[in-house]
């Protein structure tokens, strides 16, 4: 696992040193750090899930099957409406997760399966429970992104049962004081509504570094550790210390750990601002951009000093719809983001539907392996016209705004795909076409791919899972699924090298989660990446660390990481050369 557990000095003199060491070791839980920060607080365990309805539970004698089906559909609609209402007040990743989960509450396969069981005599609660289990098992067996949707189904199932019973839905516990939330894992809908004023840190025994839990924790700036086996057995109310950078939780915090948490709080106040100037110590410019999912995110990112947008996710326009939004609707939504960055770069990603973002009018939910299926740019081959209309909307918004708009397609694998995307952009007057490098083939053939377009942006989340053949959502594969893998860093290097070959000289940015890791941001800069895009909350930390190294030092650290035999050693070797990380708690 990445990082090592710092020494745990004793604060109790009644026990021998050996006894204390054994006790501390037994109460320390190593996992994978996914969002930095050091916190001391009492823990609150996620409440136990909704109880399963009794096996074989039947409709009450004389009860109407039609009434039971109607009650089920009413409950499902109520769950949908509640999740949709929460989505309206959320933003970015949280909003997208809530909208996707709300869709599951209206899933026809789930509700029709439950209705059939009711017609066979089952109670409504038992029917939705069994139907949910069947749908979740089907999704799990499909693997990849669809396996992650299984959790959505089980979450929705529990919410519908709670609605039928007239009891509160499962969710994040309440407490008189802020706390560390500990769970086996969180349902996407719960993760999406985490309140940093209440939840100070997040620790799960399951999940992976690119799970919904990890991604949203980073976007909220919550210290977080995933895949920390055993944390869900710690007693509720236990005081604990969480180190989101080193990736562990310890019960019975030591004096040293309390001091580290206090120092983190002080440093966080110092790092609250970003002066809008990403640069190394010797003046090498590294523009720091933000990842956004809508106008609300864009306004917040601009307020935090982002130098532009490196990833504008456009899926928010399409989720929770049975039909494609009009060109006019899209153009208005895009312009609202562009208007937050007048005169600055905004890199928009065209619709990345498929896999974990299925759309009824565009994607096929029955694909055997959706992560390797028709997603992103590929949907244009099966449902032509959607991409062209989106590009028309982007061009319309571009012409009415003052932003410097760049447009990139996700899931580009070949030169022919890059060439055609560039021609589609040109047809509507968009002059800055680019590609996402998420598929290893695009990295390996970057020199020829970049002849066709003006830039590339590395999506390190997908690039890592495809390079390592490791589902990014799975906790047991967390050690494989890290962008610190030397093989993944080599793909980044090949992309940058390809951008300079044959007179290309095309910019290559990173918009995946790797850019938000201050140590990895230094390595990426050393590899020649020209811009870094991240959740806006990470801008100040990355900027602070970048300013402590020269470009030459960053290049040396990149070479060191590439030469490491494993991801663990690559990370440890680089961090050992960056003492500022420990001083700041990163």
Image: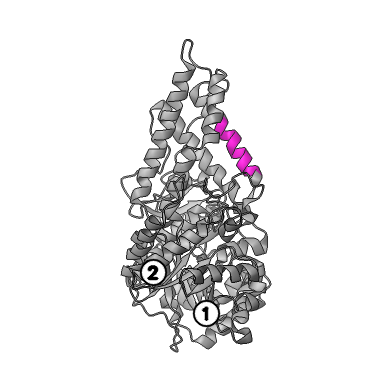
The answer to whether residue 495 is left or right of residue 394 is right
For the point 47% across and 37% down, the residue is: 106
The answer to whether residue 178 is left or right of residue 22 is left
Of the two numbered discs 2 and 1 on the same chain, state the one appearing first in sequence. Answer: 2
Range of residues picked out in magenta: 131-141
Closer-to-camera residue (295/226): 295
Instruction: Give the image quarter of residue 82.
Output: top left
Q: Which mark is residue 398?
A: 2
Q: Which mark is residue 507?
A: 1
For the point 61% across and 42% down, the residue is: 139
- Estimate the spatial distance between the alpha carbons at disc 2 and disc 1, rounded to whole Å: 21 Å
- Percent across and percent down for residue 102 are 44, 42
Closer-to-camera residue (292/316): 316
* Figure coloring: one colour
Instruction: Give the image quarter of residue 487.
Output: bottom right
Q: Secondary structure at mark 2?
A: helix
Locate the N terminus and report the quarter of the image it occupies. Answer: bottom right
């Amino acid at each position: 696992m990445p990082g090592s557990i710092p020494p745990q000095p004793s604060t109790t003199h009644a026990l021998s040193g050996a006894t204390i060491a054994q006790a501390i070791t037994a109460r320390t839980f190593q996992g994978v750090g996914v969002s930095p920060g050091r916190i001391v607080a009492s823990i609150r365990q996620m409440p136990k899930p909704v109880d399963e309805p009794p096996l074989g539970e039947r409709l009450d004698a004389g009860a109407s099957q039609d009434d039971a089906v109607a009650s089920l559909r009413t409950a499902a609609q109520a769950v949908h409406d509640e999740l949709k209402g929460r989505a309206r007040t959320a933003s970015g990743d949280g909003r997208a997760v809530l909208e996707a989960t709300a869709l599951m509450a209206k899933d026809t396969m789930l509700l029709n399966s439950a209705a059939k069981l009711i017609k066979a005599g089952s109670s409504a609660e038992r029917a939705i429970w069994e139907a949910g289990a069947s749908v979740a098992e089907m999704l799990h067996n499909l693997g990849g992104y669809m396996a992650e949707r299984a959790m959505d189904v089980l979450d929705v199932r529990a919410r519908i049962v709670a609605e039928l019973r007239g009891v509160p839905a499962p969710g994040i516990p309440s407490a008189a004081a802020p706390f560390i939330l500990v769970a086996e894992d969180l349902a996407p809908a719960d993760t999406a509504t985490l309140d940093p004023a209440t939840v100070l840190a997040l620790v799960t025994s399951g999940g992976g570094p690119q799970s919904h839990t990890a991604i949203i924790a980073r976007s909220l700036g919550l210290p977080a550790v995933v895949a920390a086996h055993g944390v869900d057995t710690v007693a509720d109310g236990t005081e604990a210390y969480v180190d989101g950078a080193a990736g562990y939780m310890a019960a019975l915090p030591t004096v040293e750990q309390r001091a580290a948490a206090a120092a983190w709080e002080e440093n966080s106040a110092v790092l609250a601002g970003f002066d809008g100037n990403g640069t190394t110590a010797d003046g090498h410019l590294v523009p720091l951009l933000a990842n956004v999912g809508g106008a609300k995110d864009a306004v917040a990112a601009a307020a935090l000093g982002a130098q532009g947008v490196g990833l504008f996710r456009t899926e928010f326009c399409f989720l929770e719809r049975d039909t494609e939004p009009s060109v006019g609707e899209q153009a208005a939504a895009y312009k609202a983001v562009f208007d937050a960055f007048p005169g600055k770069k905004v890199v928009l990603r065209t619709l990345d539907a498929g896999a974990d973002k299925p759309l009824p009018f565009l994607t096929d939910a029955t694909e055997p392996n959706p992560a390797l299926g028709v997603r992103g740019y590929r949907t244009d081959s099966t449902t032509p016209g959607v991409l062209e209309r989106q590009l028309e909307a982007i061009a319309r918004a571009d012409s009415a705004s003052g932003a410097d708009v760049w447009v990139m397609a996700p899931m580009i694998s070949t030169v022919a795909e890059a060439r055609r995307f560039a021609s589609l952009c040109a047809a509507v007057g968009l002059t800055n076409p680019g590609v996402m490098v998420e598929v290893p083939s695009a990295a390996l053939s970057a020199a020829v791919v970049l002849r066709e377009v003006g830039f590339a942006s590395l999506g390190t989340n997908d690039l890592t899972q495809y390079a390592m053949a490791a589902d990014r959502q799975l906790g047991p594969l967390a050690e494989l699924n890290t962008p610190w893998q030397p093989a993944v860093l080599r793909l980044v290097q090949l992309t940058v090298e390809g951008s300079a070959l044959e007179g290309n000289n095309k910019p290559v940015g990173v918009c995946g989660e790797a850019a938000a890791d201050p140590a990895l941001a230094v390595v990426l800069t050393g590899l020649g990446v020209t811009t870094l895009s991240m959740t806006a909350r990470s801008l100040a930390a990355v900027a602070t660390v970048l300013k402590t190294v020269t470009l030459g030092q960053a290049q040396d650290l990149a070479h060191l990481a590439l030469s490491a035999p494993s991801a663990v050693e690559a990370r440890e070797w680089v961090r050992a050369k960056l003492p500022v990380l420990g001083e700041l708690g990163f």
